[in-house]
Amino acid sequence: MVEIRVTRPEDRRAAAAVVSTALLQAPPDDEAFEKSQASWYGCDSLSAWDGDTCVGHAGGYRFETIVPGGARLATSGVTRVGVLPTARRQGVATTLIRQLLHDAAARGQVLASLRASEAVIYARFGFGIAGCASMISFDPHAAAPIQGAAPGSMRLIPHDRILDVIPPLYHRVATRPGIIGRPDFIWRRYLEDAVKLGGDAHLVAVQTDPDGHDNGYVHYSTKWDETPFSPVTGIGEVWDLFGATPAVELALWAYLCDVDLVGEWRADERPVDESVVLAVRDHRAYVPKVAAWDEQWLRLLDVDAALRGRSYGDCTRSVTIAVSDDLLPKNAGVWSVGSDGASRVDHLDPAGADLVADIATLSATYLGGFRWSALAAVGRVQVNDPEALPAADTLFLSAVAPFCGSFF
């Protein structure tokens, strides 16, 4: 019989090997495992054991997620989910994830967030796609000049100062719904190549306004395109680009346009509503290669705290929403949501609520990236009051598209 238990420190190596195998990678060698140790200490780790053999694992990092209105809510970042091929279809992953979510809710974490290797797995655990991102290509020569860029100057950060300067700057300027607080081990992974000498060229540049305040940064890398039979030119990768305002982010893109020898910039993870699309000279200079991939899956672990924790749009009426949650029964109930906030309504029969939805649907709407009316159109919302749909759209919609920008 398979046993689920908290992973002991001496068992992390075996759990890491299981996750690597499940994700089509080789188990980590000594150097790779030692490098990952900090992330294991920052992980709520559960593993599945068949006798002395580890056959499955699921973990959750502890961080915060920014929600509409700017509040930062405690989040379990679900990660390292994997089961050996010999233990599949035995309910191991289901048991691990359900226990992980129960434990996170009991700790007081309000949300759970994840990146899905497969898009059909997590809805049954109450997750919904709450935010998307674009994979893009950017032609600096066709884009320049960038319109609307904030005034100021740019400076490159010395490699030995990057970890001092960038994390607090990110915390201050990265404020979209969906942004997470990055633990130290994530920062060290993200900036590993930028803080060392040698290897690929990774650089970090900061934008400073005329009054001397740092308001944004871009982390990028460059190399020569050595594709056979192609013109010799430089290509660049944008790893991070965050500014306090859209104008600051435009200034960061304008800076990239001025990097010599680079004929193309690429980025795997950018907001779907990025303002630079409207600021380039040639609209085709910014091309989504993958227009809206499912960047952020979200699950509300505490519906009451989550709904109270975010702000809502200006609407002349409130909406009552009945929620069902098979995994966490305390989330089942009815809430009234209006411009002034949300509150639980204990006296109303769920069948009489304006809108009725399961926890995955509510989670998909929570950051404001998906409309209630769109989800109702595909049968995911029971609508008892048709006039409640446009009101819910207005209340929940975010002024900017949700975006996380962090892979964990």
Image (spheres, grey):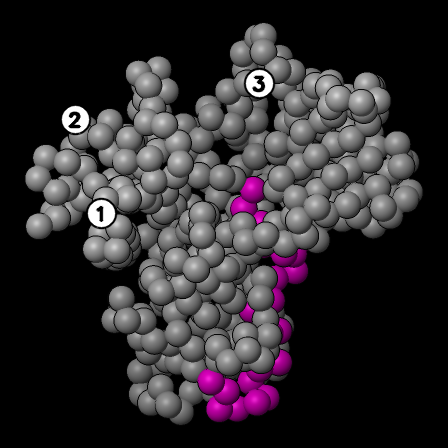
In the displayed structure, would residue 201 be above or below residue 380? above
Q: Nearer the viewer, residue 310 or 330?
A: 330
Label 1, secondary structure: give it: helix
Does label 3 or label 1 sit earlier along the sequence? Answer: 1
Count up the numbered dots: 3
Label 3, secondary structure: give it: loop
Residue contact at pointers 2 and 1, CB within 8 angstroms: no
Label 2, secondary structure: give it: helix
What quarter of the picture does the C terminus occupy? top left
* Residue of label 3: 194
The answer for how far apart the CA atoms under marks 2 and 1 are is: 22 Å
Does label 3 or label 2 sit earlier along the sequence? Answer: 2
The magenta stretch spans which residues? 382-405
User: Horizontally, is 73 left or right of 176 in the view?
Assistant: left
The answer for how far apart the CA atoms under marks 3 and 1 are is: 40 Å
* Residue of label 1: 87
Does label 2 or label 1 sit earlier along the sequence? Answer: 2
Residue plotted at (52% across, 72% down)? 340
Residue 340 is tagged as none
Residue 10 is tagged as 2
Residue type beneath disc 3 = Ala
Would you say residue 279 sits in the magenta stretch? Answer: no
Q: Nearer the viewer, residue 152 or 254?
A: 254
Residue type beneath disc 2 = Glu
Crowd rating for badge 1 (residues with CA inside 10 Å; few <14, some 14–19, many 20+): some
Q: Which of labels 2 and 1 is toward the front?
A: 1
Residue plotted at (56% across, 23% down)? 165
User: Residue 87: x, y in percent?
Assistant: 22, 47
Q: Which of labels 3 and 1 is toward the front?
A: 1
